[in-house]
Image: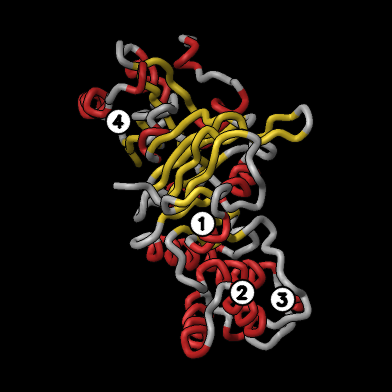
């Protein structure tokens, strides 16, 4: 299956700074890719190369089989773009802005008016339909930026921080909309919000200093965490030290972490060697020791820890072989 988006060895420099350094990946229709990285990692520059806002110094961006450098007008017709900051015309109303954006895309007549109404309902803009954009909250401005990106029903969506400035309810609505749109589109979401990956993404790329340092499903990235398959136990019996001693003797356990849970409760986090599954071994210890356990679960791994490790050079204890 031909990918809808291809980044082929993209390079972009600004003076002596290489912002994007030989970046390659592809995204297919029906897939949502999370593009993650710390500030200054090259996320936004990569998005601008893919959308034709910037020209690469090396490599090329291809959208629906069309090279962005060789035929930018055609390539851009296939995509919708929500840029960082959602730049808008402050004196226009949402209704007027969407009419302008649709006309720029070659839309007119009933096709344009029907689509404006449909998109306004989708992103819940109708209550501010006739207010000047400069009077809108940051959240409404973000929704309007998203509305213009999807107005022409493109095959590709590139969204730079789509939930920035939204409250939790609005974030949930946008994420649900993105999931529904992905059934027939290829979508890239550039974000620094790690919860966005679990919430909507099928796959995630982590970029650091202009280079891709990880590419995989959320589960594959979580498996890189030293907490992958760790077992969390909460208890209030006062025997946490006895239990920790028993669990620490298991050959498959690398480390034990003890912490307070509040209200007299304690948490024991049992960290395995090399991410191996230890749930059944831990359960046997609990079952044979008469411990009063309030909670018991296996962790998938912590994406924030993986992110920090890959973007700061800090290695996990497990990778370093430290106790």
Q: Residue at x 50, y 48 (%)?
A: 67
Q: Which residue is mark 2?
A: 104
- Give the distance between the C-alpha atoms of the residues marked 4 and 2, in whole angstroms: 68 Å
* Local crowd size for mark 1, using a 10 Å CA cut-off: few (<14), some (14–19), many (≥20): many
Quarter of the image for residue 43 reads: top right
On the image, the x and y values in percent for residue 237 come to 38, 34
212 w.r.t. 150: above or below: above
Residue 260 visible in rendering: no
- Give the distance between the C-alpha atoms of the residues marked 3 and 2, in whole angstroms: 23 Å
Indicate which disc, 1 or 3, sits on the residue closer to the N terminus.
Answer: 1
Q: Which residue is mark 3?
A: 136
Quarter of the image for residue 268 reads: top left
Q: Which residue is mark 4?
A: 291
278 w.r.t. 292: above or below: above
Q: Which residue is mark 1?
A: 75
Indicate which disc, 4 or 3, sits on the residue closer to the N terminus.
Answer: 3
Which is nearer the eye, 214 or 315?
Answer: 214
Are the residues flagged by discs 2 and 1 in contact, CB closer than 8 Å?
A: no
Are the residues flagged by discs 1 and 3 in contact, CB closer than 8 Å?
A: no
Indicate which disc, 4 or 2, sits on the residue closer to the N terminus.
Answer: 2
288 w.r.t. 64: above or below: above
Instruction: Kindly state the secondary structure of the residue where label 2 is placed.
Output: helix
On the image, the x and y values in percent for residue 151 come to 52, 73
Q: Using the image, tell me which numbered label, if any, was put on residue 200.
A: none
Instruction: Kindly state the secondary structure of the residue where label 1 is placed.
Output: helix
Q: Nearer the viewer, mark 3 or mark 2?
A: 2
Instruction: Kindly state the secondary structure of the residue where label 4 is placed.
Output: loop
Q: Nearer the viewer, mark 1 or mark 3?
A: 1
- Give the distance between the C-alpha atoms of the residues marked 4 and 3, in whole angstroms: 57 Å
Are the residues flagged by discs 3 and 2 in contact, CB closer than 8 Å?
A: no
């Amino acid at each position: 299956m031909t990918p809808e988006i291809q980044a082929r060895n993209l390079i972009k420099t600004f003076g002596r700074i290489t912002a994007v350094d030989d970046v390659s990946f592809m995204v297919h229709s029906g897939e949502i890719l999370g593009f993650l990285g710390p500030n200054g990692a090259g996320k936004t520059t990569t998005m601008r190369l893919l959308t034709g806002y910037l020209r690469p110094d090396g490599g090329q961006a291809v959208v629906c089989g069309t090279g962005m450098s060789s035929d930018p007008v055609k390539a851009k017709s296939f995509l919708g773009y929500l840029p960082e900051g959602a730049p808008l015309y402050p004196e226009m109303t949402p209704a007027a802005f969407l009419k302008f954006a649709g006309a720029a895309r070659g839309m007119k007549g009933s096709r344009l008016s029907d689509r404006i109404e449909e998109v306004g309902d989708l992103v819940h803009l109708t209550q501010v339909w006739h207010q000047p954009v400069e009077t809108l909250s940051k959240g409404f401005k973000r929704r309007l930026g998203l509305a213009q990106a999807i107005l022409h029903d493109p095959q590709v969506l590139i969204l730079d921080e789509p939930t920035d400035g939204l409250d939790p309810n609005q974030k949930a609505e946008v994420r649900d909309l993105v999931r529904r749109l992905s059934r027939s589109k290829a979508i890239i979401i550039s974000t620094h919000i790690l919860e966005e990956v679990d919430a909507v993404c099928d796959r995630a790329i982590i970029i650091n200093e202009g280079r891709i340092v990880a590419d995989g499903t959320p589960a594959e990235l979580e498996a890189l965490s030293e907490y992958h398959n760790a077992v969390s136990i909460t208890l209030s019996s006062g025997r946490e030290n006895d239990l920790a001693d028993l669990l620490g003797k298991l050959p498959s356990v690398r480390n034990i972490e003890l912490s307070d849970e509040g209200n007299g409760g304690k948490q024991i986090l049992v960290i395995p060697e090399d991410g191996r599954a230890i749930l059944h071994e831990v359960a046997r210890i609990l079952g044979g020791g008469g411990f009063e356990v309030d909670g018991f679960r296996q962790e998938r791994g912590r994406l924030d820890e993986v992110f920090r490790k890959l973007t700061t050079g800090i290695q996990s204890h497990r990778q370093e072989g430290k106790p």
